[in-house]
């Protein structure tokens, strides 16, 4: 998983994968069927483990806007370079890959993540669920790209807080204007 995450699908060879796993290429093919089979398993493992920041954020409970901001903060902690890996495997592991099957796996994983986020947002904001989920998806993609370009946790956390405020405002969540400027919201005109 680390090799795909750190360098992307295309940049990693079967021999290198076998070496990292401590097996020879024929054993890798016997265990996973192909390089794409191993990539599929890596994506599956990442999406049920540390990469599932939505599930981690939801575990803390609270209203949707609070969970979304917590999720963005988790991304700010997860995405910066750690142990030669930065960004998100789901978002970037097969981006621009020459292999159509790898691209399709990445696209399917991104679509599933966005659908899970949209379904969660719909529990409080059904009419706005799609655009709000798309907003957060784009924010996460930007955070992943920034982390791959060297952005650290402090910078990503500042962005996560700002994106959380923007989410609250777009959603019309309670306290949105107060959270944005740190002062009471002005009454809205009807």
Image (cartoon, grey):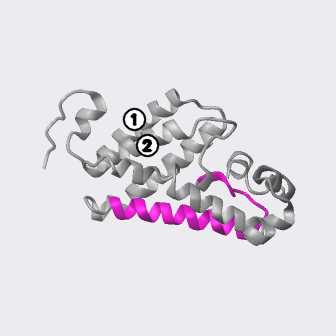
Count all numbered tags in the image, as a single digit.
Answer: 2
As for residue 150 lying within the magenta part, the answer is no
> Horizontal and vertical percent for residue 28?
79, 64
Q: Nearer the viewer, residue 48 or 125?
A: 48
In what element is the residue under mark 1?
helix
**142 horizontally vs 165: left or right:** right
Q: Main secondary structure of the magenta part?
A: helix
For the residues labelled 2 and 1, say whether their Cβ atoms are less than 8 Å apart.
yes
Q: Nearer the viewer, residue 49 or 101?
A: 49
Give the mark toward the camera: 2 or 1: 2
**71 horizontally vs 22: left or right:** left
Q: Residues within 10 Å of mark 1 (few under 14, many from 20)?
A: some
Q: Residues within 10 Å of mark 2 (few under 14, many from 20)?
A: many
Q: Which corner quadrant of the image does residue 69 belong to?
A: top left
Residue where numbered disc 2 is placed: 72
As for residue 119 lying within the magenta part, the answer is yes
Q: Is residue 47 visible?
A: yes
Residue where numbered disc 1 is placed: 161
């Amino acid at each position: 998983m680390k090799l795909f995450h750190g360098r992307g699908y295309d940049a990693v060879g079967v021999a290198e994968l076998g070496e990292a796993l401590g097996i020879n290429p024929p054993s890798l093919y016997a265990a996973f069927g192909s390089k794409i089979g191993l990539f599929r398993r890596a994506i599956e493992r990442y999406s049920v483990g540390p990469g599932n920041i939505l599930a981690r954020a939801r575990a803390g409970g609270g209203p949707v806007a609070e969970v979304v901001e917590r999720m963005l903060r988790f991304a700010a902690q997860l995405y910066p370079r750690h142990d030669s890996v930065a960004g998100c495997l789901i978002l970037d592991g097969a981006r621009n890959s020459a292999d159509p099957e790898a691209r399709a796996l990445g696209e399917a994983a991104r679509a599933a993540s966005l659908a899970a986020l949209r379904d969660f947002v719909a529990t409080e904001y059904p009419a706005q669920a799609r655009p709000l989920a798309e907003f957060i998806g784009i924010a996460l993609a930007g955070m992943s790209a920034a982390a791959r370009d060297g952005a650290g946790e402090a910078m990503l956390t500042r962005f996560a807080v700002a994106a959380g405020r923007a989410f609250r405002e777009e959603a019309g969540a309670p306290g949105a204007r107060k959270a944005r400027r740190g002062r009471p919201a002005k009454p809205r005109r009807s």
